[in-house]
Amino acid sequence: MKFYKAYNLCIASELQFPELIETEGEPDAIVRFGNIDDAIATQYESGKSFLGEIPEVGKFFIHSGREIVINTVPGVDEALIRTLLLGPVLCVLLRQRGLLVIHASCIDINNKGVAFMGGSGWGKSTLATAFHNHGYSVLTDDVLPIQLEGRQAIVFPAYPQFKVFPEALSSLGHDTKSLSPIYQNAPKLSYKFTRGFQQTPLPLQRIYVLDKGSEHAITKIQPQEAFVELVRHTRAMNLLTEKEFVTSHLHLCTQLIQSVSFCRFTRKPSLEDLPDLVKLVEDDIAQLTAQDDSRNVDQTSSSYSLATKD
C-alpha cells in the first residue's frame, strides 16, 4: 500500500493515485480491492455503510468513513476509477465522517477560504484556475469538505490538480497539447500544478453561488435562499438518505449559514472576461474584510468601555 494526503486524511491505498501527495502516518482511511456481493452490507451496522454500483465500472463499498472496498470490471480505465474514487466515492466517506461536502472550488485570499459553488460546467474550476494564474493558492477544485467547529467553518484541502475544459485553459494562456484528459475520452483535461497549493486547512470566509446572466454582478442573498442552494449543491445528497444523515446534513447547513456569508455571483459566459471576474471578487473580499475589521474594532472598543466603567 501507498500512503497519501487528501481532504485532511491520511489514505492508505492499494490503488496508486499519482494525483495525490504521498505522506506517512497512521491511516485515517483505507482503499483496497476486494470481492463485493449484495450480502456484504448486512455484516455492518445499518446507516454506516454504503454499497453502490456504477455500470461498466464496478462496485464500491464504503464503511463507517474509514474503508473503501472496490471491485472493478476487468479492463476498465484506471484513470476513470481514480476520478470516481476522488470524487463521488470519497464524498460519501467524508459525509460518513460528519463533514458537510459541497460542489465547490475554493481559493485562499488573505489566509481565508473563498469558495465558488455550483453545478457541473458552471465555471468553478475555471475561476479557481484564473485565480491561480493571478498568484492565489488553491485548496480544492471540485469537492469541498467543511468541518463546523462551533461558529467557525474550516475548509479541508483536496489535491493539486484542476479538471478544466481545454478552451478555458487556452484562454488563460496554458498550452493544452501536453495535457491529458482526466480519463479516456473525458471532455476535461487534467492540469496538475506544483506551486500554489494550500495544504493547510483554512477558515471559510465567503461562498459565492455561481449563476449565469447578461452582466457581471455580486449580490447578497438571504439565509433562506442560501439554505436552498446548499442543499441543492451538497455532494452525495441522493446517496445517503438515512434519517441520521439527512438530519445531520440540515443541521450542518444551518450552522454554515450562521458562520459564513453568501453572495450570488452572476457572470456573462465569456472567457475573455476572466481577469475582470478576478478583480470583481478581489474588490468584494476587500470590502468584506474592511467591514469585518471595523466590526472587530467596534467590539474591542465596546469591551474596553465596559471594562473602564467597571
Image (tube, rainbow, N blue to C red):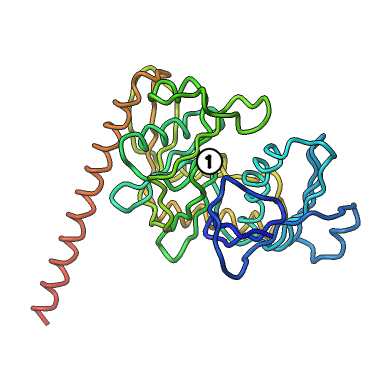
Check disc 1 and give the amino acid type. Asp
Q: Position of residue 88 (x, y in %)?
A: 65, 44
Q: Nearer the viewer, residue 171 or 238?
A: 171
- Give the side of residue 43 with respect to residue 219, left or right: right
**Farthest residue, direction front:** 178
Residue depicted at x 37% and y 45%: 137
Q: Residues within 10 Å of mark 1 (few under 14, many from 20)?
A: many
Circle 1 sits in a helix, a strand or a loop, which is it?
loop
x and y percentages locating residue 196 in the rendered image: 38, 45
Q: Quadrant of the C terminus?
A: bottom left
Tell me: 275 left or right of 154. Answer: left
Quadrant in which residue 199 is drawn: bottom left
Asked if residue 285 lies left or right of residue 63, the reply is left
Residue sitting at the far bottom: 310
Residue at x 61%, y 33% (from the top left corner): 182
Percent from the top left, x then y, of residue 94?
61, 56
Query: Which image quadrant is residue 43 in?
Result: bottom right
In the depicted structure, whether residue 45 falls above or below residue 128: below
Q: Residue at x 62, y 46 (%)?
A: 86
**Residue occupying the point 23% across, 43% down:** 286
Say which residue label 1 marks: 142
Q: Residue furthest left?
A: 308
Location of the N terminus by quadrant is: bottom right
The vertical placement of 246 against 237, above or below, is: below
Q: Position of residue 126 (x, y in %)?
A: 44, 30
- The tally of labels here is 1
